[in-house]
Amino acid sequence: MTTISTATPTLGRGDDDRGLQAVLLDMDGTLVDTEDYWWQAEASLFAELGHELTAEDRAHVVGGPMTRVIDHLLASTGVDLSPAELTVLINKRFVDLLDGEVPLMPGAERLLNTLAAHGVPAALVSASHRHIIDIVLRSLGAEHFAFSVAGDEVARTKPHPDPYLEAARRLGADPARCVVVEDAPTGVRAAEAAGCPVIAVPSVAPIEPAPGRLVLSSLEQVDLELLRSLVASRV
């Protein structure tokens, strides 16, 4: 299991000039190209149980969190499984489908290396459970992050602001000076509720631009100058 440091990291070099303090990044669909794996896990499992999931189901479950996914799938299909049982089955199917291979999104590695090179702390903030994050971090690289926050480690996960507020707290940072990078509406709502500026790179569900929210087509468009400019416009 990957060891995640709980020590308070040093803030970014903008700490003393009201600039960028940190970047908080979602995982599935943002840094790693796994949204299709999650959907395949859910759709194939329910097909075996005699239920065909639809595009409407996919739009509802994209971005998690697992509790919301499970509640929707149980309500829409009526399968005779408990939430705990279905959670275990979906997570196991997802891991089996990955088979050790976790494809990164275009621009993800470059962005993480840029943040490290300029001393900007990064935290991974995901609605996925801890054991899933630890598997993905083997490919993504735990060394890129000061720590990670998992969906089963907070009382309320996305779309509530708690995961992003917890990340900012652990960094000793002002949420308004932490740029969040997300791919799903659920995560965008969580980040904005926490008071963070947001870069949205939609993976499955569309996301519209809004005040304090920049919508891009790829992580390859994200650089340090852009990240700093989003904070400068807020503080």
Image (spheres, rainbow, N blue to C red):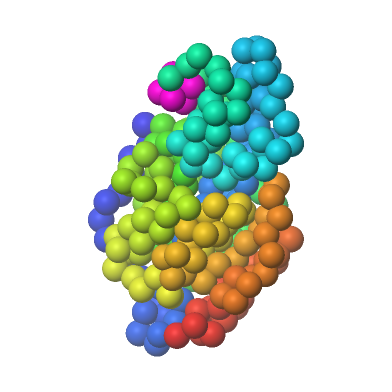
Quadrant holding the C terminus:
bottom left
**What is the magenta segment's predominant secondary structure?**
helix
Pick out the residue farthest to the left: 7
Q: How many marks?
A: 0
Q: Position of residue 99 (x, y in %)?
A: 60, 23
- Reply above or below: 216 against 136: below
- Comparing 233 with 12, the one in front is 233
Does the magenta run of residues contain 145? Answer: no
Question: What span is colored magenta in the figure?
Answer: 83-87
Residue appearing at x 48%, y 16% in the figure: 81
- Comparing 211 with 137, the one in front is 211
Residue appearing at x 71%, y 55% in the figure: 206
- Reply above or below: 202 against 208: above
Q: Position of residue 194 (x, y in %)?
A: 42, 65
Q: Is residue 123 visible?
A: no
Residue appearing at x 41%, y 43% in the figure: 151
Residue appearing at x 49%, y 83% in the figure: 234
Q: Is residue 32 left or right of residue 144?
A: right
Quadrant holding the N terminus:
top left
Does the magenta run of residues contain 86? Answer: yes
Q: Position of residue 111 (x, y in %)?
A: 59, 61
- Reply above or below: 101 against 111: above
Q: Position of residue 211 (x, y in %)?
A: 60, 76
Q: Is residue 175 visible?
A: yes
- Comparing 135 with 185, the one in front is 185
Q: Is residue 147 left or right of residue 223?
A: left
Q: Quadrant of residue 3?
A: top left
Q: Is residue 193 left or right of residue 98?
A: left
- Comparing 48 with 11, the one in front is 48
